[in-house]
């Protein structure tokens, strides 16, 4: 469960199935009572219909919680807190960061830090495309020490500078307004292959 919409969806499924719960948080539901095997299977089927799954493996649940905290922190917080993410993660999950980091790295094949960077760059790409903030404002909002730091990291991940990415995305929008459908589709494909970044 990554978003508010997912939480609302899970709550509605639980209420429709008349399953009492005490809380629904990102990646975790606390039930008022233990579920029978049949009811757990029904709940699992209902969640699966909505693209969600019921997880029983404690390591998988913990990895999902880490992912949810990162996504919530990067994509849904207006202002990122000015403290280390390791402290935030340890506090939210009530576990030692080094143990979380080892588990995440061994399971996902990348560090938590790299996972955060990937998500931060995706968020930066969104903010650039929205074109409401300057690069300086974006770097501050996304907790970079400077625009140069943001630009360097952006180029390492995407292969493009933020300015080139912005120009390509703006050119794509402008050109699509004046082209035939076939030309627009070709141009869109061409730009997507040039801007092919981290779609995950």
Image (cartoon, grey):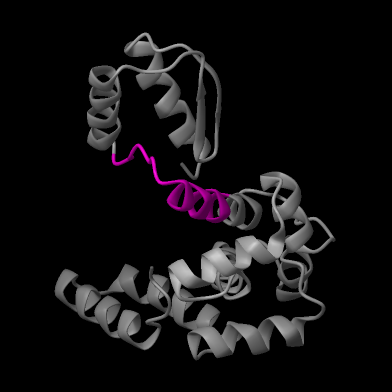
Image position, residue 190 (x, y; %)? 28, 85
User: In the rendered picture of this protein, how many numbered marks are placed on residues?
Assistant: 0
**Image vertical order of residue 50 relative to residue 59, above or below:** above
- Highlighted magenta segment, given as a residue range: 51-68
Question: Is the C terminus in the top left, top right, bottom left or bottom right quadrant?
Answer: bottom left
Left-right relation of 114 to 138: left
What residue is rendered at 44% in x and 67% in y?
Answer: 107
Image position, residue 53 (x, y; %)? 33, 40
* 64 part of magenta stretch: yes
**Image vertical order of residue 139 relative to residue 29, above or below:** below
Q: Is residue 122 visible?
A: no
Nearest the viewer among 96 and 133 is 96
Q: Is the magenta stretch mostly helix, strand or loop?
A: helix
Choose top left, top right, bottom left or bottom right for residue 41: top left
Image position, residue 103 (x, y; %)? 54, 64
Left-right relation of 117 to 176: right
What residue is rendered at 56% in x and 62% in y?
Answer: 130
What residue is rendered at 54% in x and 78% in y?
Answer: 166
Image position, residue 170 (x, y; %)? 48, 75
Nearest the viewer among 133 and 3 is 3
**Image vertical order of residue 66 relative to residue 84, above or below:** above
Left-right relation of 173 to 80: left
Choose top left, top right, bottom left or bottom right for residue 113: bottom right
Choose top left, top right, bottom left or bottom right for residue 135: bottom right
């Amino acid at each position: 469960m990554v978003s508010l919409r997912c939480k609302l969806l899970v709550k509605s499924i639980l209420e429709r199935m008349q399953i009492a719960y005490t809380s629904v948080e990102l990646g975790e539901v606390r039930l008022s009572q233990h579920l029978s095997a049949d009811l757990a299977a029904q709940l699992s089927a209902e969640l699966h219909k909505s693209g969600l799954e019921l997880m029983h493996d404690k390591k998988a649940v913990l990895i999902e919680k880490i992912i949810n905290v990162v996504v919530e922190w990067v994509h849904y917080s207006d202002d990122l807190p000015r403290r280390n993410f390791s402290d935030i993660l340890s506090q939210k999950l009530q576990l030692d960061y080094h143990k979380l980091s080892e588990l995440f790295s061994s399971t996902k094949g990348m560090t938590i830090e790299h996972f955060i960077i990937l998500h931060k760059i995706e968020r930066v790409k969104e903010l650039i495309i929205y074109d409401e903030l300057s690069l300086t404002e974006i770097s501050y909002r996304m907790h970079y020490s400077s625009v140069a730091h943001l630009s360097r990291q952006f180029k390492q991940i995407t292969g493009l500078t933020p300015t080139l990415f912005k120009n390509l995305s703006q050119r794509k929008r402008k050109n699509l307004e004046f082209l035939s459908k076939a030309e627009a589709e070709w141009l869109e494909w061409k730009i997507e292959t040039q801007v092919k970044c981290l779609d995950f």
